[in-house]
Image: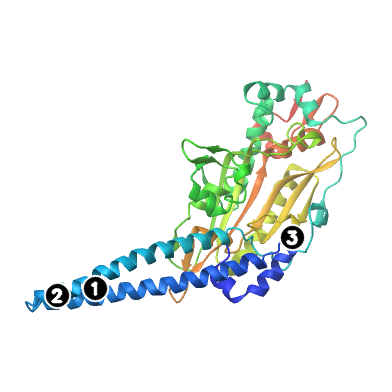
Amino acid sequence: MLEIQRIRNNKEAIIAGLDKRNFNVQSILEEVLSVDEKWRLKKTNLESIIAEMNKISREIGILFGQGKKEEGNKIKLQITALKTKESVLKNEVNELHNKLVKLMYQIPNIPDELVKKGNGELDNEKIEEIGKTPKFGFKPLSHWEISEKFSLIDFELGVKITGSGFPVYVGQGAKLQRALINFFLEEGEKNGYIEYIPPLLVNESSGYGTGQLPDKEGQMYYLEKDDLYLIPTAEVPLTNIYRNVILPNDDFSIKIMGFTPCFRREAGSYGKDVRGLNRLHQFDKVEIVRIEHPSNSDKALNEMINHIKELLNQLGLQYRVLRLCGGDLGFTASITYDFEVYSVAQDKWLEVSSVSRFDTFQSTRLKLRFKNADNKSEYCHTLNGSALALPRILAALLENNQTTNSIKIPKVLHKFTGFSEIVL
């Protein structure tokens, strides 16, 4: 959420910034400023009434202390009238504040100056491409064909148990999945991230805190009876660890990570793009989260990008890094870099990670602040990234490392798998 002070002081700059997203925010900003003005006026009136009531209460105390009960009781009538006004104004102030917050929830984050204007994924900028496409002396199989051939993943069994988008990992397929998780966590620890195992269910406040609500409400699984949401990413519980927290000073750099299953409805997905592991309703992911001083967030973003690159380099996968254009940028992010691995059998690029910086957009919602050198509160910057999402990594590993009768396992995973190849 944008800070209200920023909206008051920088209306035209916000309009220009959101034009990169093709988002016309002018009418919303005008309504925000109108409601904000009314709210501040009502709030000032309420504070004046409360101050007047306090003043009269002190006068009554003095009168009673002097034995002037009759005069004191007369003045009490003024308190009664003011209390009625106070009650009405409190309701009006709360209603205006709630309306203001709902309006501000509709405004996405301002794109960073590096972000280009664009309509969608075709306008994203390719920053770099690493690795070469593997060559085969035979027609390579898709990962779903490999999974069936080597009995690694049973998609039909998942349909039987739950439905499409819920695969069952079997035998060496399950071990390979677990090996990747352990590898990602070990590398995260080497890079200074503290591991958490967070809840998989979150409350509404957590969803609003990181911006999944109300923006992505339709994509989240909701348990109505308990009023809880299944997490779409570990970003939600991990970042909410610091909701309503004021860090005691400006000397901080918080690095945390967590492995969790993730749950997404993926409504409207169909066809070849959802074959096999391409798009699932439940999948595993290791997430990294950083909470930084504003002056350090650019450096932190670059460190996170390099961390993801190193994971992919060690796995020996061909990948490319994209900077998303305004039209493809997530609602809460100011800048995002996507990582895509190349699937040789499908002849397509598969997204495996998004690394994003949110500036103060999430921390404003979270009320996540720190005390600066003048002992005043400032909002922190938050960042997160997939390090990494498992399904498409596994798909690329199976497809790009296949032979006619085996699958070669990257060397960095051997100590976790206990085997160096999968054979028929």
Q: Residue at x 71, y 22 (%)?
A: 156
Q: Amino acid at mark 2?
A: Gly
Instruction: State which quarter of the image contains the C terminus.
Output: top right
Question: Few, some or many C-alpha atoms within 10 Å of disc 3 (few <14, some 14-19, many ≥20)?
Answer: many
Who comes first in sequence, dot 3 or dot 1?
A: 1
Instruction: Tell me if I can see residue 416 in this picture.
Output: no
| Residue at disc 3, secondary structure | helix
Three-letter amino acid code of the residue under disc 3? Gly
Which mark, residue 226? none
Crowding near pointer 1: few (<14 within 10 Å), some, many (20+)? some
In-front residue for pair 392/194: 392
Residues 397 and 376: in front is 376
- Residue at (68% x, 26% y) in the render: 172
Q: Position of residue 90 (x, y in %)?
A: 38, 64
Q: Quadrant of the N terminus?
A: bottom right
Tell me if residue 71 can be seen.
yes
Q: Could you say which is closer to the camera, residue 283 or residue 326?
A: 326
- Residue 277 picture quarter: top right
Instruction: Specify the label residue 326 is tagged with.
Output: 3
Q: CA distance from mark 1 to mark 2?
A: 10 Å
Q: Amino acid at mark 1?
A: Gln
Residue 72: image tag: 2
Say which residue label 1 marks: 78
* Residue 405: x %, y % from top left: 83, 23
Q: Quadrant of residue 285?
A: top right
Instruction: Measuring from the top left, give residue 24's x and y in whole percent.
Output: 70, 64
Residue at 71% in and 25% down: 155
Using the rendered view, name the quadrant where residue 4 is placed: bottom right
Instruction: Give the secondary structure at mark 2.
Output: helix
Q: Earlier in the sequence, mark 3 or mark 2?
A: 2
User: What is the distance, in whole Å, between disc 3 and disc 1 at their CAs?
Assistant: 57 Å
| Separation of marks 3 and 2 at Cα, in angstroms | 65 Å
